[in-house]
Image (cartoon, grey):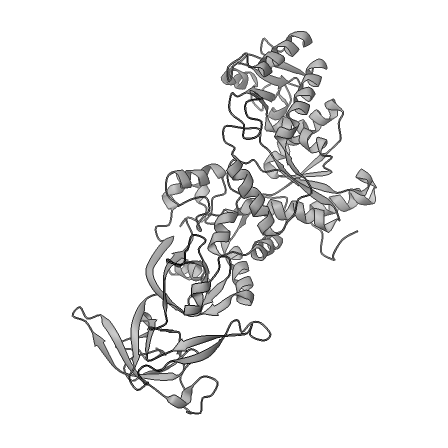
């Protein structure tokens, strides 16, 4: 029955019990039902991995269904981005569906409820309806329109569809129980009037089903066996079941799991849209955003996100996941797959005074030492003048500084041991050149010099280096739980993006491709930005080599 041996989560246990009981003729059909009103984020990735994973694990299928019942906020741009994100994560849907495909059927369902005296048209305002619903401890009271006849309700509902009334002038409500302790069963709204252009049905409709009405019926139309929702839909489940029961349609069942809450992150689409519209970030796919497209642009891999979702599991209770777990997953993945390259972000020139002028050597460096054969090798040009990191040199070095300083020696990665004998400063006291001598018999892999050094630094040949802009991304918020703040934007991290306009990189990186991971040796993991060009190379930092954030917090 199962594709692999793995402990079952509580939803998988339910499905296995259903299969053993012979329910649904042994079928498993789940669905992922996003509303196309924004870009998917890491929280949606958890739901995607769960729903599609259930289909895979139980030899079933998963539909992609766009819940497009609110035309004012939905757009084909979001539809396209959602499809791209799911495919990028490595999943394929069985059927591509839209709730709007079912508008005629849903409308007929509504007329059916009216005919059964289970729904009525209400002229009350939203405020009047809310007041008449009562409170959790006091029953609601019927509005004057609850007693309308079937014939009058059908006439009014058809007039609503025909566009006779303005937005908010009338609604269709279910007739259930105004004293029910579950407020969602106190005559909930089923349809509202909304004169807005729909991205698929254009202006055919001016009434649209509410989510609670469209959700269960769409599941039923598609014969979904297991409808997986997040915990906030638990109070909605009785209405889901009520509609299916009264309409006498396929009995889809709803099950709930805990949504993803992650530290230093907001998951609300509304809040993410605010960040975009108010210019706190560049766009939905800004690499600081928790959107799947933002993570992709930053250099996260599909496998790292799937691993993260697998590690956090499926729970019945809300909890907060530390973002460092997501960062751990991408580090683990890139450590195994990322190509090693050298880049200098804060350059100072190093001149090897005893190296022949004009001479160039082609040295060899491993692409990835974590692979069995090192992932192959690349050639790296080496010359008399090199760029090194400014903080790899100290004019007055302390005892345990194992890099360069007057009289100190260090190995150049993949190259030679050099020893500093002089340096030059400008009028402001800034070091502009470091002068070293090299030991010709200390070449990496062929070292016969007998010289021992404790430090190794990276470098790039001045004559061969390519220029690049480097964007150092960090967490967007300083607050561990920004969503809980009165103003979530007040905790935006002003250091979430630092831009280095001119860095020097290995010439090999000029042919880098987006979504290829690189480890800039000693600096972190990077990828080429999707907005990069041959004239302007831009690399985004995916994640640091270690969790430097934790150290910063602990120091504070």
x 66%, y 19%: residue: 177
399 sits to left or right of 314: left
* Residue sitting nearer the eye, 280 or 507: 507
Q: Is residue 284 above or below residue 333?
A: above
Location of residue 149 in the rendering, given as x and y in whole percent from the top left corner: 67, 7
- Whether 347 is drawn above or below 434: the answer is above
**Displayed quadrant of residue 164:** top right
Is residue 519 rendered to the left or right of residue 503? right
All told, the count of numbered labels is 0
Residue 112 percent coordinates (x, y): 71, 18
Give 329 or 536, whichever is nearer the viewer. 536
Q: Horizontally, is 463 left or right of 283 in the view?
A: left
> What percent of the width, then of the height, locates residue 535?
37, 58
In the image, what residue occupies the spot 24% across and 72% down? 432
| Quadrant for the C terminus in the image | bottom left
**Depth check, front residue: 513 or 540:** 513
Give the side of residue 431 with respect to residue 306, left or right: left
Residue 378 in view here: yes
Q: Is residue 209 above or below residue 323?
A: above
| Residue 529, image x, y percentages | 44, 55
Q: Is residue 140 visible in the rendered structure shown here?
A: no
Q: Measuring 50% from the left and 62% from the top, which residue is drawn there? A: 517
């Amino acid at each position: 029955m199962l594709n692999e041996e793995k402990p079952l989560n509580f939803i998988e246990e339910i499905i296995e019990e259903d299969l053993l009981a012979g329910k649904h003729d042994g079928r498993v059909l789940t669905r992922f039902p996003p509303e196309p009103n924004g870009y998917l984020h890491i929280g949606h990735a958890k739901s995607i991995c769960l729903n599609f994973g259930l289909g895979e694990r139980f030899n079933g299928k998963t539909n992609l269904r766009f819940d497009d019942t609110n035309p004012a906020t939905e757009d084909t741009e979001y539809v396209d981005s959602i499809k791209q994100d799911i495919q990028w994560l490595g999943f394929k849907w069985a059927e591509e569906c839209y709730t709007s495909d079912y508008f005629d059927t849903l409308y007929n369902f509504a007329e059916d409820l009216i005919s059964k005296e289970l729904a009525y048209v209400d002229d009350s305002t939203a405020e009047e309806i809310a007041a008449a619903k009562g409170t959790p401890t006091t029953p609601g009271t019927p509005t004057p329109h609850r007693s309308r006849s079937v014939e009058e309700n059908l006439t009014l509902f058809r007039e609503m569809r025909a566009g006779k009334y303005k937005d908010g002038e009338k609604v269709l409500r279910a007739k259930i129980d105004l004293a029910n302790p579950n407020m969602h069963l106190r005559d909930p709204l089923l349809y509202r009037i909304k004169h807005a252009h729909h991205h698929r049905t254009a202006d055919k409709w001016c009434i649209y089903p509410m989510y609670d009405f469209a959700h269960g019926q769409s599941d039923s139309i598609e014969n979904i066996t297991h409808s997986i929702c997040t915990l906030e839909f638990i109070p909605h489940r009785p209405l889901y079941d009520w509609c299916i029961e009264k309409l006498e349609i396929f009995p889809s069942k709803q099950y709930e799991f805990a949504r993803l809450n992650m530290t230093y992150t907001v998951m609300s689409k509304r809040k993410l849209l605010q960040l975009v519209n108010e210019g706190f970030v560049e766009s939905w796919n800004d690499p600081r955003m928790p959107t799947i497209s933002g993570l992709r642009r930053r250099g996260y891999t599909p496998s790292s996100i799937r691993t993260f979702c697998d590690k956090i599991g499926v729970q019945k209770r809300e909890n907060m996941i530390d973002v460092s777990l997501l960062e751990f997953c991408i580090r683990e993945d890139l450590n195994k797959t990322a190509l090693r390259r050298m880049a200098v972000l804060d350059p100072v020139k190093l001149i090897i005074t005893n190296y022949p002028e004009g001479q160039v050597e082609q040295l060899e460096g491993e692409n990835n030492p974590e692979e069995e054969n090192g992932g192959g090798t690349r050639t790296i040009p080496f010359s008399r003048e090199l760029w090194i990191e400014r903080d790899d040199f100290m004019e007055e070095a302390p005892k345990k500084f194992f890099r360069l300083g007057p009289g100190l020696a260090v190995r150049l990665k993949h190259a030679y041991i050099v020893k500093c004998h002089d340096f030059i400063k400008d009028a402001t006291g800034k070091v502009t050149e470091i002068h070293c001598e090299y030991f010709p018999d200390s070449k990496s892999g062929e070292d016969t010099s007998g010289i021992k050094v404790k430090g190794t630094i990276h470098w790039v040949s001045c004559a061969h280096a390519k220029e690049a802009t480097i964007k150092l991304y960090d967490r967007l918020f300083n607050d561990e739980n920004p969503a809980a703040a009165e103003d979530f934007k007040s905790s935006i991290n002003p250091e979430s993006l630092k831009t280095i306009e001119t860095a020097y990189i290995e010439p090999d990186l000029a042919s880098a491709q987006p979504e290829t991971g690189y480890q800039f040796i000693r600096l972190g993991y990077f990828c080429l930005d999707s907005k990069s060009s041959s004239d302007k190379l831009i690399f985004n930092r995916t994640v640091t080599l270690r969790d430097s954030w934790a150290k910063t917090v602990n120091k504070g």
